Amino acid sequence: VKWSDGVAHDALRTPSTAHFEAMKQTARPRRFPSMHRTWRNPPRCGSAKATTRLQEGIARFYDASSALWEDMWGEHMHHGYYPDGKVDQIDHKQAQVDMVERVLRWADVKSVQKMVDVGCGIGGSSRHVVRKYPGSTATGISLSPKQVERAKQITEEAQLEASFQVADALQQPFEDGSFDLVWSLESGEHMPDKKQFVQELARVCAPGGTIIVVTWCHRVLQEGEALTVEEESLLKRICDAYYLPAWCSIQDYKDLMQEQGLESIKVDDWSEFVAPFWGAVIQTALQPRGIIGLFNSGWETLRGALVMPLMAQGFRMGLIKFNLIMARKPL
């Protein structure tokens, strides 16, 4: 298989997709309709009821799946970074650590006093930061009580200065200007109101502080352009499984950050460098240990596994992008 960059990605040329397609024939019907729509401009919330329902689904999904992910892939619940876009002999857990380190380097983060980890998972990024920057502290928030409980346990055992709590990223329980590093690694895609999300990131950021968002986006649309029917269909199926609302592009994020008066905005596309990730996850899931774990974790986790080949397909099509955006809050 070759991506649009012309690089062959052998990790995705496996029988995995066929295996998962066969499993889908016995899958249950969807219980929740997709909230996905095509937008040229970033979406806002629908109703409060719809947002609450989405957030409850997100919490259930991660409550059910986090233990299996940790068992198979470790404490970091996000893509790995592959320098040449190839797997070779790279350790996938180390690739996830490398992702955090590369993002910090890309954003030129030289020191940290107080960090907020928005959508913290089980705290992998928070612990990495407090280890890397002596004297720093981290506060992580997640909708998943089980993630928060596990994050606290690991952090206490490691004797690190990080705390975790169940909280809504769209209504963060912090004072204005509380953190000099505001960090969101693969949580933005779950936010039903991208404008409110960016507003909250800017609000809790201290003057002179740094905001970093790493997130899944759809490709940038030209003026008057819409996603194709095929693209719409693929994203809809992913949305249903992963409790995602409307997707947006990295340009939409840039526009929102400019509206907040943020400065030194920088964007990037690392799709090439995460190319092998989904193929590797699929291969892991198809191992006996992975299959048993999926079924033991329940339908929420199994449904997420069934659409993993669609994520790989979306990246190959150039539809799904692994984007980064950072900004500074003016003094």
Image (cartoon, helix red, strand yellow):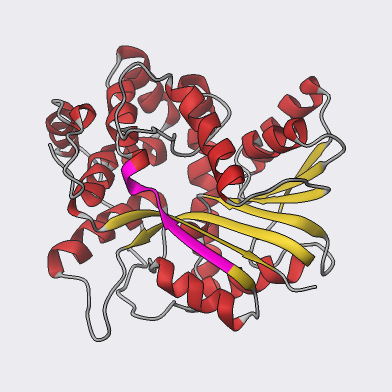
**Towards the viewer: 193 or 179:** 179
The x and y percentages for residue 126 are 70, 39
Vertical placement of residue 227 versus 103, above or below: below
Vertical placement of residue 105 versus 180, above or below: above
The x and y percentages for residue 183 are 64, 52
The x and y percentages for residue 262 are 65, 74
Q: Quick one: quadrant of the N terminus?
A: top left
Q: Residue furthest bottom?
A: 224
**Towards the viewer: 92 or 112:** 112
Q: Residue furthest top?
A: 288
Residue at x 48% of width, y 34% of height:
65
Q: Quick one: quadrant of the C terminus?
A: bottom right
Residue at x 36% of width, y 26% of height:
295
Res 81 quadrant in image: top left
**Towards the viewer: 283 or 131:** 131
Is residue 194 one of those drawn in magenta?
A: no
Q: Which residues are magenta?
A: 265-272
Dominant secondary structure of the magenta stretch? strand
Is residue 269 one of those drawn in magenta?
A: yes
Task: Determine whether, in the image, residue 304 is placed left or right of residue 135.
Answer: left
Vertical placement of residue 293 versus 65, above or below: above
* Residue 45 visible in this rendered orientation of the protein: no
Res 122 quadrant in image: top right
Res 196 quadrant in image: bottom right
* Residue 64 visible in this rendered orientation of the protein: yes
Task: Determine whether, in the image, residue 38 is placed left or right of residue 96.
Answer: left
> How many numbered marks appear?
0
The x and y percentages for residue 105 are 59, 43
**Towards the viewer: 135 or 178:** 135
